[in-house]
Amino acid sequence: MKTLWTFIDSRKWKARNKYHFVFFISAFFGAFTGFIFWLVIRTWAFSTLDWMICFIGYPILLSLFWVYIYTSNHPF
């Protein structure tokens, strides 16, 4: 995360654009991780698409709070 943070901080973007970019990246990786986790688990249980949406969606919602907490401690 530190490498991503220094990369974004080196850009001449406004703070709002930096926050949006960090949120998008963290939401993407969270959703991807949830999808991979669902692919592994679906062989034993939770094999419907409803569960896939849950495993993808919750990390996106949690990344919003994660970005808020991280950016509160590490301002641009």
Image (spheres, helix red, strand yellow):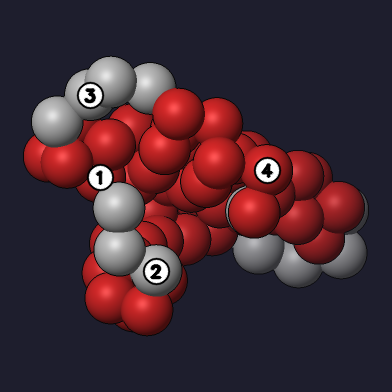
Whether tag 1 and tag 2 are in contact, CB under 8 A, the answer is: no
Measure the C-alpha gap from mark 2 to mark 4: 13 Å
Measure the C-alpha gap from mark 4 to mark 3: 17 Å
Measure the C-alpha gap from mark 4 to mark 1: 15 Å
The kind of residue on which mark 4 rests is: Thr
Measure the C-alpha gap from mark 1 to mark 3: 10 Å
Q: Is residue 61 visible?
A: no
Residue drawn at 34 percent across, 46 percent down: 23
Residue 31 placed where, x, y %? Answer: 53, 45
The kind of residue on which mark 3 rests is: Trp
Residue that mark 2 sits on = 74
Q: Which mark is residue 13?
A: 3
Residue that mark 4 sits on = 3
Above or below, 22 against 68 in this view is above
1 or 2: tag closer to the N-terminus:
1
Instruction: Please tell me in which quadrant of the rendered image residue 54 appears.
Output: bottom left
4 or 1: tag closer to the N-terminus:
4
